[in-house]
Amino acid sequence: MALYSEKVMDHFRNPRNVGVIEDANGIGEVGNAKCGDIMKMYLKIEDDIVQDVKFETFGCGSAIASSSMATELIKGKPLSEVRKLTNQAVAEALDGLPGYKMHCSVLAEEAIQSALEDYESRQGKPAEGAGT
Ligand code: FES
């Protein structure tokens, strides 16, 4: 049996939603100290819905596939659902990851939750650049 599922290979070779959202209102960056991989998530949230999401991942193939799949899972979704996203759900959507690569999907979960926290911490504060 192949080490990686076809879905992992597909999302690794053709990652969805790669890039930066210039006017993102939630940004999260996380890293794994052991492997040194870094993942950054940009969220554009309006009316409690993820209108757009993009990522930049400096990391292994599984991390790239996990971030790509995670963006697909949360795009267009209400924040109540996004908060519940687990690395397990990301790995399952990829038809599984080898055990020693599960931490790559954890990075995707953490990056999204960190971006969500950033969004929430910005709420109630004056919008940046809103000065006259
Ligand atoms: Fe660390 Fe994949 S090896 S994120």
Image (cartoon, rainbow, N blue to C red):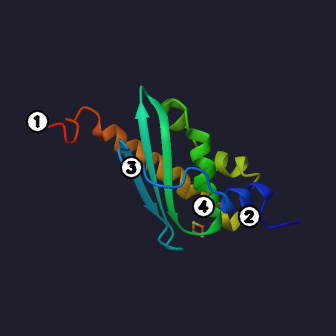
Q: Which mark is residue 23?
A: none
In primary-sequence order, the first of circles 2 and 3 is 3
Q: Could you classify mark 2 by the number of other residues whose Cα lies within 10 Å: few (under 14), some (14-19), or many (20 or more)?
A: few
Residue position marked by numbered label 3 in the rendering = 27
Residue drawn at x 66%, y 58% as measured from the top left: 14
Q: Which mark is residue 98?
A: 2
Give me the C-alpha separation between circle 2 and circle 3: 28 Å
Give me the C-alpha separation between circle 3 and circle 1: 25 Å
In primary-sequence order, the first of circles 2 and 4 is 4
**Viewer-side residue, 83 vs 8:** 8
Give me the C-alpha separation between circle 2 and circle 1: 53 Å
**Viewer-side residue, 117 vs 24:** 24
Contact (Cβ within 8 Å) of mark 2 with mark 3: no
Q: Is 103 on the left-hand or right-hand side of 54?
A: right
Residue position marked by numbered label 1 in the rendering = 132
Q: Is 98 on the left-hand or right-hand side of 88?
A: right
Residue position marked by numbered label 4 in the rendering = 64
Residue type marked 1: Thr
Rendered position, 36 above or below 16: below
